[in-house]
Image (cartoon, rainbow, N blue to C red):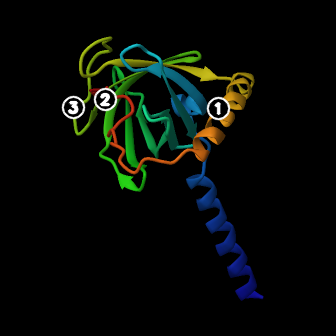
Amino acid sequence: MRTLLAALILAATAAAVRADEAKAPEGDLAKLQGAWKAMIGPNRDIPLTMEIQDRSLTLALPTPGGDLRVFKGEIRLDESKSPKQMDWVKMMSEGLELPDSLAIYELTGDELKIASSGPKKERPTRFAEEGPSRTVTFQRQKPDDRAKESAPDAQVKDEKAKEPQSSTRSLSPSPLTPEPHP
């Protein structure tokens, strides 16, 4: 009987520890949960989508060749700093590990501004429209917005899947860093 009681206490303690480890996001991290979209590039005509679930981060953007490049990793926030800080860590794309990116952010309702100089660069100290730490503005995507956009995207992806794929693709280290075009 004592062995059974000890096992039950141990199991209850382990469950409580796991519950603490898996606690729901709080603060700005809770507000960032869901899908976001920004338009990037010199003409702000390239869609960049971002999905945040707990601490997991997924970014997707089309390449000039029509492929969809996906970046996955984790997000870390420091709300105590001014401006607030955001780090993209453990990022991977196409099987390659990418360097961490340090950024600043500002969250106002359904608008998220992020400024980053790119991987292995210093964190920006201000938001700028030009230069190496250009500000990217994301808009929260509501379920209705995502449903409208996914139907045409699915058709384009199906058509692209039928085309022969190029084996020579360059990998930009960060979707927020402007990629030079020839």
Task: Identify the residue at horizontal 61%, vertical 46% (top origin).
Answer: 162
Q: Is residue 1 above or below residue 132?
A: below
Q: Nearer the viewer, mark 1 or mark 3?
A: 1
Task: Identify the residue at horizontal 29%, vertical 16% (top origin).
Answer: 126
For disc 3, the marked residue is 122
For disc 1, the marked residue is 153
Percent x, y of residue 92 = 41, 50
> What mark, if any, has residue 179 been given in the picture?
2
Q: CA distance from mark 2 to mark 3?
A: 18 Å
Percent x, y of residue 105 = 41, 23
Percent x, y of residue 43 = 40, 13
Q: CA distance from mark 1 to mark 2?
A: 23 Å
What kind of element bears circle 2? loop
Q: Nearer the viewer, residue 58 or 95?
A: 95
How crowded pointer 1 is (Cα within 10 Å; few <14, some 14-19, many 20+) is rated as: few
Q: For the image shown, how many numbered marks are present on the structure?
A: 3
